[in-house]
Amino acid sequence: MAFDSRLPAAYQEEGPVVTVLGSDHLVTFDYAEPSPIMLFAQRWWRRTITLMKVGVVIAAVGAYPIMTVASNKIDDSPIEVAGQDWTVPAVGVSIVKIARELEGAGWAGDRANWHPQARLTAMPAWQGATADALSEHTNLLAELTVQDGEVDSDLKAAARLLMGVEGEDMRPRLTAAAEALNRYDSRAARGLATTPAKLDKLKAEAALFSGWAEADRNDLSLQVNQDVVEWPASKTDIETFYGAKARAHIAQQMLVAARNSEPRLARLPAVSSAFDRAELAWSRAAQMQPLIVSNQNGDGPFMANHLASIGFYLGEAQDASQNLAEALAHVPAGALENVASLEKQLAAAP
């Protein structure tokens, strides 16, 4: 037999050594079993992988609803303008409120259809009512600052921009409105724009807020007295509730700013008492924070009727606003100036 010349010499001379194993050298594995520990680990590993897959699917399905709930941010915290350099504090409240809604959670009505906020009901109603309320209040300021038959251009523009337009993005409009309000306040500080008389402004605001309360009470009553209601509340119920809450928040914050800007009102007992009552009544309506809005039978064992509750608070707010307007109407002309002169005299006294 010829061998390849490339093989080692030992193979060429002797050939490969072949060992034949007999059956005595074979090991049988008839009774061999896998380790119980390894079987346990393998079983739990398969279960862990399956659980992880199911968890990923559940997370993917549930992420959108969770994001939707998390994006619903109703910011009804106090608006602090005391100590800030605002010529007309009400303008400062409006600007801060606009900035808070835009830079906080964002404007829900401008979101694309895929965005979680586009599925919300409460927040768009809150923001829409906020913009409309600020527009009405700005229009009130414009009417009180008419000079030579001309409405202030910045106030007029701001009131128009704050009023929502169907199908149009609100962020550019709100930004422009805030800029117009800021221009007006800056011109008023330099004496280039007319500012409303304080007592006239307070009386007009009290009448405006009373009108808000009356209109919202009528809307709430209509929803509460529906023959057929959805459980726990319909979309219209939620929109009506948060619209009323938004206007209550604006009314309360405007009253607080007006009172802080004119501390001499505290020297008039009737006016001070009326302010206390009005602020308290509006704050009760503004601070309602139900986890889920309900329009169910009020004497039920579980679900309350939040629309009836806020309607009750608005009834008190309406009466308190009317009382405030009457108290301000009875303040004699020049009373605040007389109080200021009396304070100066007392301060100069030895």
Image: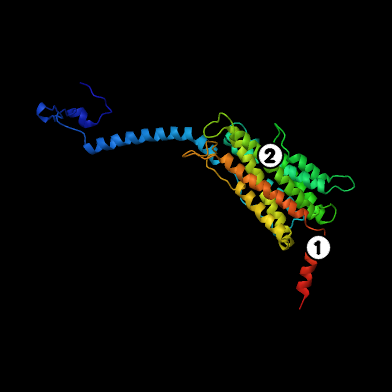
Can residue 140 be seen from the camera position used here?
A: yes
Seen from this angle, which residue lies furthest left?
24
For residue 80, which quarter of the picture?
Answer: bottom right
Please, what is the three-letter code of the amino acid marked with disc 2?
Answer: Ala
Proximity of marks 2 and 1: CB atoms separated by less than 8 Å: no
Location of mark 1 (residue): 337
Q: Is residue 341 above or below residue 310?
A: below
Q: Is residue 238 left or right of residue 52?
A: right
* Residue drawn at (52%, 32%) of the image: 231
Q: Is residue 24 left or right of residue 40?
A: left
Residue 255 drawn at (x, y percent): 69, 52
For residue 158, which quarter of the picture?
Answer: top right
Residue 24 drawn at (x, y percent): 9, 29
Residue 65 drawn at (x, y percent): 51, 35
Seen from this angle, which residue lies furthest top?
1
Mark 1 residue element: helix
Instruction: First in sequence, mark 2 or 1: give its number.
Output: 2
Q: Which mark is residue 81?
A: none
Q: Which mark is residue 215?
A: 2
- Quarter holding the N terminus is top left
* Frontmost residue, 187 versus 213: 213
Q: Is residue 15 above or below residue 67?
A: above
Seen from this angle, which residue lies furthest bottom?
350
Number of other residues with Cα within 10 Å of mark 1, as a class: few under 14, some 14 to 19, many 20 or more? few
Mark 2 residue element: helix
Please, what is the three-letter code of the amino acid marked with disc 1?
Answer: Glu
* Frontmost residue, 327 versus 345: 327
**Image colouring:** rainbow
- Quarter holding the C terminus is bottom right
Can residue 100 be seen from the camera position used here?
A: no
